[in-house]
Image (tube, rainbow, N blue to C red):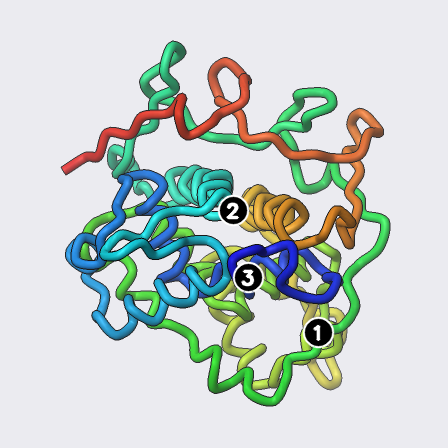
Amino acid sequence: MSDLAESSAPLSCSVFGAVEAIGDAWSWLLLSDAIIDRTHRFDAFQNRLQIARSTLSARLSSLCANGLMAQDGRDYTLTPAGADFFMCAMTAMAWGDRWYSDGEPVPLRVAHIGCRDRIRAELRCAACNEVIHARDVSFDRRPGALDAGPDTAARRRAPNLDLLQRPRRSSIAATLQVLGDRWSALIIRELFYGTARFEEFLQHLGIATNILSQRLQHLVDHGIIEKQAYQTRPPRYEYRLTAKGLDLYPVPLSMLAWGDRWLAKGQPPVRLTHLRCGEALSPRLSCSECARPLTRSEVSFVRRH
């Protein structure tokens, strides 16, 4: 499907649509590498990411089928929808830089041409130009329950996230070690909609209980959520976002904005309001130093070897 806007029935959730269209962590890294480093050849992707050739072929084919890349002979080029993934990649990088640099220089230094040579990307409200925080956003409805479908388990085997950092340190890969599989990304979506209890996640996501338990523990282990007991007999817990988890908000928000633009057919399924200004929220990727909008053509990258 070369035209994302014509690819499916109206969405109930743009984050879910983005997760389905983009794919897993390997697809994220392929798109990010194409955007940041201008990679476009099969062998170059394989050498840079050290991904199995069969896996690489499958992910590139999927990205082409979903309208994010186009194959032209030996080249894989970004479509407009794929190039617009820039905001998702930049918010993922910024979060990984903050939480996984361990005091070391960041792996990839971002410069805003004509501004500063060390910046980070942030999301600002297009109406008031204030930085967006999770607790300053309301929504008019929450998505309905997902219909997982009978072949979900076969299609959605989680990638080995430990392999993402194998070729080189990457802040995007660090972020994907947290949300780089379908279920983790959708659980994080639910957390920002206020879902807290195990049974609620089951109801909203249609996820198997063992997979939900594994993914929740994964997010606890990474410090994204914490368990809080609300009942002792039998013991039951709520899962609440930590400060680290709340700070992750720009990543699912950028995925929602991408899905609204490319998948929602002009009808965003969930409408957000920025409580600070009272206007409909339209997130804009911005420079942390000058607050002006960031585009790929105005940004350069220097990789730390």
Q: Quadrant of the C terminus?
A: top left
Q: Which mark is residue 22?
A: none
Residue 237 place in picture, x, y as percent: 68, 72
Can residue 236 be seen from the camera position used here? no
Q: Which mark is residue 19?
A: 3
Amino acid type, label 2: Ala
Amino acid type, label 3: Val
Q: Which mark is residue 146?
A: 1
Seen in the picture, residue 64 relative to 244 is either above or below; the reply is: below
Q: Nearer the viewer, residue 207 or 63?
A: 63
Kindly identify which residue carries mark 2. 81
Q: Residue at x 49, y 22 (%)?
A: 288
Seen in the picture, residue 14 relative to 65 is either above or below; the reply is: above
The disc, 3 or 1, on the residue closer to the chain's N-terminal end is 3
Residue 222, by quadrant, is: bottom left
Residue 223 place in picture, x, y as percent: 49, 56
Amino acid type, label 1: Leu
Q: Nearer the viewer, residue 62 or 142?
A: 62
Give the crowd class for mark 3: few <14, some 14-19, many >=20 residues within 10 Å: many
Residue 92 place in picture, x, y as percent: 45, 45
